[in-house]
Each structure stands twice: as C-alpha cells, then as structure tokens.
Amino acid sequence: MDDFDFSIVRRTSPVCFNSQCPSKDHCLRYLAGLHAPDGVEVHLCVMPKAIKGERCRMYQKIQTVRVAYGFSRSFDALLKRDDTPIRKALVKYLGCKRSYYWYLRGEKPLMPEQQAWIENLFRQRGYEGGVIYDRMDDIYVLDSVAY
C-alpha cells in the first residue's frame, strides 16, 4: 500500500485520521490520510462521530480500479465518414472539448464505465476491434461525498 498516490484524492473526497477506528486497516479513507503529504494543511476529513458500532458510515474498502489512459490510436482505423460523428459523441459524453482532449491524450484516467460507453460507441458504428488505449493501470479511487 506504499504505492498510494495522494494526488488522486479530490477535494470532495474526505480522508480519515482516526487511529481508533476498528475498520482503519481496511479503509481507503484512512490509507489516504496516512499518505497525505506534508504540504497538505487543509482537507475534508471524516469526523470520529461517523463510527457507529463496528463500522464507520464513511468506510470505503481498499481496492483498485482498472483505468485506461489515452485512446487517440483508436481513430487510426476509422473510416472518414465515422470520424466526425464518433468525435462529436465523445465530446458530448465527456463533457466538453477540453475534457475530451484530456482523455484522448491520456491526461485523465477513463473509469471502467467510461471505457464501456466508448467501446459501445465504437461497436455501434461497426468497429468490433474495440478501442485501443495507450495504457491501462490499476489505481485507487476515493469516493466523493456531497455536503
């Protein structure tokens, strides 16, 4: 677990520092708290009152998610008539042109549900070979909370 990268922790993802929690050894929020770098002075955190009995209601199991980075090579095999409609659908799905390019170039990870959506788009247009990603990686993903 020494490979934890705190840079993946969003501002809306609380971390935990409660060493008295019975679930701490299996909780991603506690692991994130342990790996907070020295430069982080303020962050959203779980309060000790979140523990109810044996389990904290903010508990998140330590597990990784398989993410993909970059998919520009997927356009190499496209017919010219399919290129624009697929790009437009991807821009709409991914939010805007800026975020589309971040994902396309591999600057942001594509979550499994995003990968499935993109692969389905290519399949619907007749490209059964699927999407070609630049790389795949297993990362921790800390859930955000609404407050």
Image (tube, rainbow, N blue to C red):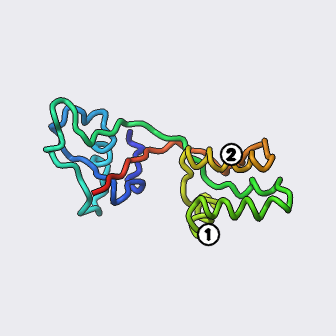
Say which quadrant the C terminus sits in: bottom left
Observer-nearest of 118 and 5: 118
SS at badge 1: helix
What's the mark number on residue 97? 1
State left or right for residue 78 relative to residue 97.
Answer: right
Q: Which of marks 2 and 1 is nearer the N terminus?
A: 1
Q: Do the residues labelled 2 and 1 touch (CB within 8 Å)?
A: no
Q: What residue sits 32% from the left and 52% below the top?
A: 145
Mark 2 burial class by Cα count in 10 Å: few <14, some 14-19, many 20+: some
Observer-nearest of 128 and 60: 128
Please state the horizontal and vertical placement of residue 11, each as a whole percent of the image: 34, 60
For label 2, the residue is 120
**In front: mark 2 or mark 1?**
2
What's the mark number on residue 58? none
Q: What residue sits 85% from the left and 62% below the top?
A: 80
Please state the horizontal and vertical placement of residue 128, each as a whole percent of the image: 78, 42
Vertical placement of residue 17 versus 80, above or below: above
Kind of residue indicated by mark 2: Asn
Count of numbered circles in the view:
2
Vertical placement of residue 83 versus 22, above or below: below
State left or right for residue 144 relative to residue 114.
Answer: left
